[in-house]
Image: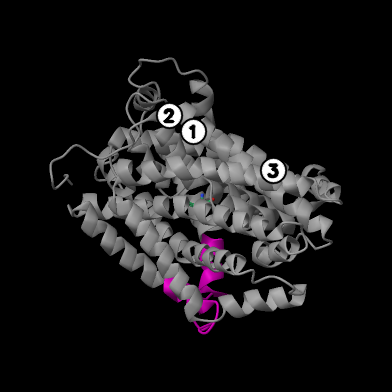
Amino acid sequence: MQNTDHSPRDGFGSKIGTIAAVAGSAVGLGNIWRFPYITGENGGAAFILVYVFIVLFIGIPVMLSEFTIGRRAQRNAFGAFRLLAPRRPWYLVGVMGIAAAFMILAFYSTVAGWTFEYLRLSLVNGFKGKSPEELNALFENFYTGGWRPVIWQVVVMLLTGGILLAGVRKGIEKYTKILMPMLLVLLVILAIRSITLPGAMQGLNFLFRPDFSKIDASTILEALGQAFFSMSIGMGTIITYGSYIRKKDRLSETAFSVAGADLAVALLAGIAILPAVFAFGIAPSEGPGLVFITLPNIFQHMPGGYFWALMFFTLLIIAALTSTISVMEVVVAFISEEFSLRRRYATIIATIGVTFLGVLCTLSQGPYPQFSLFGRNLFDLMNFSTANIMLPTGGLFIVIFVGWFLGRKNVRDEISNGGTMKVRLFNIFLFLVRFIAPLAIAMVFLNGLGILKL
Ligand code: PHE
């Protein structure tokens, strides 16, 4: 379990770089592609309110727990549990996380690939003059079409692998530090454009005026799954990144900054997308096609739409890549540390393995629908089961581990940087990870799956 080259472990070099990298992981297609359509499908404002509660009382505690595990152990998600709980089955949480990383990347890279095709289409002005039906057909034909989405997906994986080859500080940190500010600027511009469209008010109402009759058990489960997915928690990404955080940086501050940034970007994406959807008289509950069918339709009716489209799909690509690298890093860190392989080889192996599963997933959307299980094609299955089942389960065990197993002294020591700084709210944190978060996750989970009826 040692570094083969005996050099000190790679890691983040600055506070800003740390926040950029972790926020880069959290902010992604989950915020800009998934959040708006899930919000649309689940009724809007009331869903958002539930979502915010979950972020505060479950999401942030899980994130801080993962940081604590990772930085304490200085290991990948699997190795961390093995080190902190020798000869106990806790490492299974790490195993599940690595499995989830494969599954998330499989469908995530498919969607990331779509964004490349859509950037290409924007460049050649490919939406121009197309009716909504034609845009719908364009999207359907493209993603079910077989090889083109596969090629883009491979491009995504190669870019992801390429950044990871350069390492944690010289790869992940360096790129996210440039890309994240770009993303923020693009998104703010788009949001301003959207709310200044005539008829945008209705969209803002939908986003901010709650109708509680829309809330039921399955909506709450969707909110939980979305929060976990969006914050990259419950599968070891934050454990892995946590292991790269310098001992002098504040974990709680990082968790709050990242959670705040992630929530802000999701809301901004909602503001950039839903008012425009309403302004053009389209149903907000379009599902996964919202971004790829509805938006091109809107762009081509907007003055300067050519540039708005370019801007939007560039934004999506940035968001996607800073997240795919974090998911893949879970696998790379695991392979290189647990099998004592050089990072380079670990990256190559991970890229090939993940691409293989991803290609199956893309093909399950089109030419090979027989790649399916439990009545869902691979893509839907992985999208649903990772977010709504595996991540909450992982999160449940992670808070239980930190709350009940790691020991109060150790947790306090790690969060206070060895007692060198005061941690306010420590008891509240402990109370949340011991009682509130586990109970809430378990209840939402069992209730949402129909196992428990409340
Ligand atoms: N949080 C990322 C997003 O919102 C996706 C992700 C999930 C990344 C899990 C890492 C781990 O797009």
* 246 displayed left or right of 121: left
Q: Which residues are magenta?
A: 358-385
Queried whether the magenta region covers residue 359, the answer comes back as yes
Q: Quadrant of residue 6?
A: top left
Which of the two discs, 2 and 3, sits closer to the camera?
Answer: 2
Queried whether the magenta region covers residue 368, the answer comes back as yes
Label 1 CA crowd tier, 10 Å (few <14, some 14–19, many 20+): many
Residue at image x 51%, y 65%? 382
As drawn, the label of residue 251 is 2
As drawn, the label of residue 376 is none
Residue at image x 82%, y 56%? 278
Amino acid on which disc 1 is placed? Ala
Residue at image x 54%, y 34%? 435
First in residue order: circle 3 vs circle 1: 3
* 84 displayed left or right of 179: left
First in residue order: circle 2 vs circle 3: 3
Q: Determine which residue is flagged by label 3.
A: 50
Q: Are marks 2 and 1 in contact (CB under 8 Å)?
A: yes
Amino acid on which disc 3 is placed? Val
Q: Determine which residue is flagged by label 1.
A: 255
Residue at image x 44%, y 61%? 105
Q: Is residue 122 above or below residue 365?
A: above
Q: Is residue 446 visible?
A: no
In what element is the residue under mark 3? helix
